[in-house]
Amino acid sequence: MKKCLYIFIVLFWAIGCADDDGNYSYSTVNEIGIDSIKELYTIDQFDILEIEPYLNFKIGNTEDLSFEWKVNNNVISTSRICDGMVTEDPTPSGSAGYTAFLCVTDNATNLKYYKSFTVRVGTAYTNSLYILSENAEGNAKLSMQRRDRSKAPLIHDVFETANPLLGSLSKQPKQVYYYNNNFVILCAEGDRKMVAMNPKTMKLERIYGEEVIKGEYSGTFTPQSMKLYMGGMIVAKEGLFGYNYMSNQALMRPVAGSHDFAPWVDGNMTMDAYMWVTYDNSDYQFVRLHNGSGALYDEIIPITTDKFSTEGQKFLTAGHYGYDELRPVLYNTEEKKAYFYRLKMIADEWDMVTFLPIWEFSYEKIMERENLIDENSISVLGMNSLYWFIANGSKIVRMHGDGGEIRDLFTVPNGVVVDMLLDAKEERLFVASSDGVNSWVYVLSTLVNDFGAQKEEPLQMSGKIVSMARTGSWTY
């Protein structure tokens, strides 16, 4: 009986197959091939990654397709031709790079096709113009423009981009400063008044505040400006703080004593760890800050002369000429007159007992000038050319440091001048102006054949620029 049942089932199945007339609905599946994408692309951070893929497919056209380009799992473009900015951090040394891919989606079937590749990211930070500004809320903002390529875009929010989990900088920005691989931003308010950043990645390395100051100090810390050579000094509202960045990155308590130090300190660029020079606005004299152990500079020695008097003169501005010559300018408000001085400091011999340099000073007055520069002026001195560039309001003039003709350079069409910076060759002057809401940066020639000419289209940004700095070797 069971045998008959099996035979019946087999016959029934066979008849069913014979009667099948093919009532199924078949469709051709689109197959998409992705070609012409290299295995490795090398690009700098903030550059545009441009890739045009070659696509081949059986049916349809590109209108039926969707595209998604990803680098490190971040979407940078949704166009067929990749045109997205790469904002990933520079690739660490020894790393192959970031995994990237193109995903092509057939919208008719929702099938996805992938092509993977690698992106190696280089640094964009090492040859740049940096701009520190203050926005409407008083917050510090850091922007940059690469200077190793022509017509590079202005990149904003550099700190936030490099440190996405750390929030923003502090308030009341004062200075962005770079010297010898030290990149520092100073602010007068907040919990990040002094931050040290990696100049290759812009990653936050260290925060300096009241809690890290060494030397049994319990006061406040309100930095205004800084100077670094072999050693460092921070000019603050509370005084002059020593900064030993070369060994233990220590921030030391302010120089002891009751002094009205000017917001300026400088020294011999090759020997400053042993002595700094500043001006005491209460005693009306230049002073030397000596130090034997590398930190506190509590030995204060007046720099005197019987050839002239600085009575009634307060510090105005200063520049550096060569490695060992300071060019300070003092101002008498009653006379409305500026006094230009030269301080030359040389140490060719060493004391064999103390192992400290033996200093030789020359100190002289160069000239007096009226109606040229005052407390509201912005100025910069060429370290090699010895030319002063002085801005009053919107107008900029040039004068040699040893005197001579005053020559008009440029008048900014927007706002007033708030900062100036010379490039390394001193062939171009970068001028920042602001109307309090927006700011501009003009690039001016200082050469004879096109003196005062604009070399580039001005940069424009929101907020008020307060400081500029340069890093690396500029090509443009």
Image (cartoon, rainbow, N blue to C red):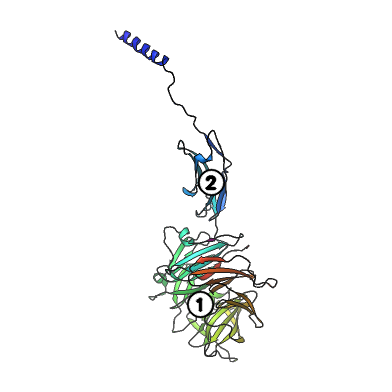
Q: Residue furthest right?
A: 449
Horizontal side, residue 211 vs residue 270: left or right:
left
Tell me the chief SS of the magenta region. loop
Asked whether residue 229 is in view, the answer is no
Residue placed at 51% from the left, 64% from the top? 143
Residue 339 in the image, given as x and y percentages of width and height: 58, 86
Q: Nearer the viewer, residue 186 or 93?
A: 186
Judged from the image, the secondary structure of the residue bearing numbered disc 1 is loop
Which of the labelled discs sits on residue 407, or is there none?
none
Question: Is 143 above or below relative to 80?
Answer: below
Residue 74 in the image, given as x and y percentages of width and height: 47, 49
Asked whether residue 260 is in view, the answer is yes
From mark 2 to mark 1, how far is it between C-alphas? Answer: 54 Å
The residue identified by callout 1 is 292
The residue identified by callout 2 is 118
Q: Nearer the viewer, residue 171 or 351?
A: 171
Question: Is 462 above or below relative to 3?
Answer: below
Residues in magenta?
151-155
Question: Is 413 above or below relative to 365?
Answer: above
